[in-house]
Amino acid sequence: MARKLSQNPSQNLSQKSPQHLSQYFSLNRRYARSVNLERDLELAEAVEGYILTGRAVDALRRMLPAFTKTNSQRAWTLTGVYGTGKSAFAHFWAALCAPKASPLRQKALEIAASSLGTDSPEFQALAQLPKPGFLLAIGTAQREPLSHTILRALMRGAEIFWPKGRKPAVFANLVDLESAIAAGQSIDERQIPRLLQAVAAAAKTDVLLLIDELGKTLEFAAQHQGVADLYLLQQIAELPRKAPHQVYLIGVLHQSFADYGERLASTERKEWAKIHGRFEQIPFTESPEQMTRLIGQAIDQSDATALAPVIRQRATLWFEHLVRQLELSDLSVEVFAAAYPLHPLTALVLPQLCTRYAQNNRSLFTFLTSAEPHSFQQFLEATTLVDTALPTLKIDQLYDYFVEAVGLGSLSHPNLQKWLEVQDVVTDASRRADLSANVIQILKTIGTLNVISSTGSLRATSELAILPLCELPAENRPGNQWETAIQTLLDKNLITHRKQGDELRIWEGSDFNVQAAIDTYFEQERGSLVEILTRLRPLKPLVAQRHSYRTGTLRYFERRYVDATQDLSALDLSKPDFDG
């Protein structure tokens, strides 16, 4: 029989002197810095810890057929806003294309086997990639002609592929062209496709041309009214498929080609869009649920084994409580446990904030890894574990981070009016001497829920406004301090309560209590419902249509509102014109 969970599971913690949470929790090393494709190209440890998310697996499945020669596609763009894991996936893919004996490819295959399974069709296809690996031409674009970026990538790839001994003749061509660029000379872009084919032929293997930040090249082309770079991309994407060794092109960018050329004439933008059509576009955006999982995968709990039973119990209590109110079908107790010491509701709200108002995973991991005020790292350093208390990072601290540390001016969402309205109310309330810290804390929680709750169940209901401030669901008892704080906010007209949807709201105009005005109006209106309806919504007469059709005589009858107090026998016509 299952053991009943204690409502205070942390009571089993041993009595110890105060210790900082940073002694128990940290961030996995992989998330301490962002991926740089050129810098990390040969580093096996750079791919260690990579997580094949649902979006990454989808991209893998779409690209693999081309690399196993069963698909004619040879060019892709990975498109998504900042921080969605495009570069990390590109680096993982490059690692899979490294020589089979290299530590880089072995580490990538281990990750693929763990995520996909060794019996999966995807893993079997990965095993068919050439043993010598590809010639990896990896480059990060700058605001320069595309040919310069490609030559730099080819030169680096050739130096790695032919590290010692005699170099093929094509290597001398690369050196000459690189010297010409360094001397400020222009080169003919039309020779780049032939050069790529020559490199593939000399290497006797396929070439993977991977360009990160491709959008910078497109911005350069748009500023200089040039189309040569766009046509060069098209030429590479359309290289012959019958060659013994292929050239594959992957571009990483933040939006479509046409969006980078938004200042161009409409005809030119259409041409850019047509060229982008030569590429298979793979969108890279993770769902908030997947980002919640990533939080747990990023937090290292290896030093918190003594706390694991308590964390598991608390996660179970929270999951069982929240699953009755929220849509948690894609989450589990394990996900909540892995996200500690984030409060479970904080783990749900943080991805929503990053998705809607910031830069997705980049802002997510910046919050987790940076030493900025109100960040996760600062919380670990400043918070202690005392006796039976297991503190969690709550939603009001997210508010402080996004508003005070990040700043609203850096948020990349077109509709910031909600944030600004909430910030104005919170700022004014914080200056008032008659409001306690608890009142300000729940005001920030309600405001944060307001900015993400245009749809969905994660709204500032009477219960969900209080639960993010509780360490355990059972703390939300009638008459608790948070209910008192909410009533204070209502009395001060700092928030309103929408009774129909049971939602607490902070919006501009909250200082006018609409519900109180309606209640006052009802108090002043003492007439019966019949009188009110008769005055405001009088009924139109009813025409006896069938009688009119049969006899040709028009007869119409008066209609009245009545209630149980009305004596029907005493009713009389208000005008003699009515027939009844």
Image: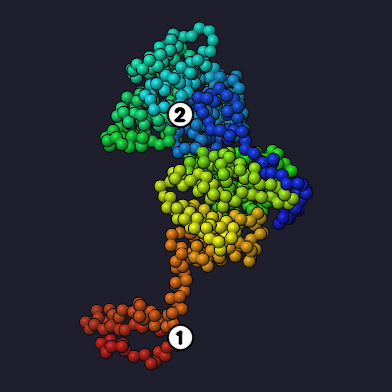
Secondary element at image label 1 = loop
Which residue position holds label 2?
Answer: 212
**Between 142 and 464, which is closer to the camera in this rendering?**
142
What's under tag 1, amino acid-wise?
Ala
Visible in this render: residue 548?
Answer: yes
Q: Where is 530 relative to 109, above or below?
A: below
**Between 566 and 457, which is closer to the camera in this rendering?**
457
Spot occupied by residue 311 in the image (x, y as percentages of width and height): 69, 47
Spot occupied by residue 354 in the image (x, y as percentages of width and height): 50, 45
Residue drawn 40% across and 14% down? 179
231 horizontally vs 399: left or right: left
**Between 558 and 178, which is closer to the camera in this rendering?**
178
What's under tag 2, amino acid-wise?
Asp
Residue drawn 52% across and 16% down? 160
Visible in this render: residue 333?
Answer: no
For discs 2 and 1, the disc positioned in front in the rendered view: 2
Which residue position holds label 1?
Answer: 564
Which residue ends up furthest to the left in the rendered image? 552
393 horizontally vs 518: left or right: right
Location of the C terminus (image quadrant): bottom left
